[in-house]
Amino acid sequence: MKIYLENDKIWKIHPDMLKENWFAKYIQIIRHFKRIFSEESILVVENDCIQKVVVTDKPVEYGKILHYDDHDYYLSRNNDGDEDGDEDGIKKELSVIIDKSIIYYDTVYQIPPRHVSENITQYTISLQKKSRIKMILEIVNNRSHDMYFLVPDNMNIQDTCSSILSLVQLVKI
């Protein structure tokens, strides 16, 4: 699943920062690929392989990651916009959108003639090499384009809070 920051204005990363030693140690994978948009589909081209992005949509969930002195907590928001839980003693609050849509790729062999493409450099960042929670940064044309957290589908969101807050601190302005 992907977890997005609802207010993504709190992060701004310049590509030069990715080369600095203090930050580079958290970068686990760097991918370079092309994303192609056409009327028929969205394609990803990487290493001469063309793959069509296929998405099975699921409803998104809105919530908050709350940081207290002694623990972190995930708070889901009800459908009517009300929130569950007590907000006394919160040190930091991060509104998030959780997307549980399933994405898979089908190999294709042609690119539609009418399309638009963008070159992407994607950085996979984690606090430890084998961490299951990863921050994904996408840079397009030397500018920050997208940031989200990749979390295994079977992981409880409550167990991701501390890692997500720590990762956000790396890129917070």
Image (tube, helix red, strand yellow):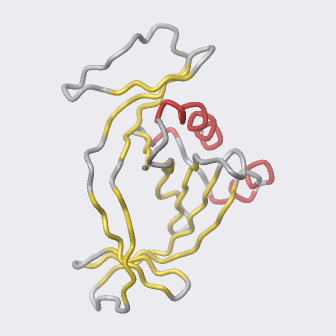
**Residue that protrudes farthest toward the right in the picture:** 21
x then y, percent, for residue 21: 80, 53
**Residue that protrudes farthest toward the top in the picture:** 88
x then y, percent, for residue 65: 47, 28
- The image shows a total of numbered marks equal to 0
Q: Is residue 126 left or right of residue 105?
A: right
Q: Which residue is drawn at 56% across and 16% down?
A: 68
x then y, percent, for residue 92: 53, 22
Q: Quadrant of residue 76?
A: top left
Q: In this view, does 61 lie to the left or right of 25?
A: left
Q: Quadrant of residue 123?
A: bottom right
Eyeballing the image, is 96 above or below 131? Answer: above
Eyeballing the image, is 156 above or below 26? Answer: above
Quarter placement of the C terminus? top right
x then y, percent, for residue 165: 58, 33
Give whichever of 9, 61 is nearer the camera: 61
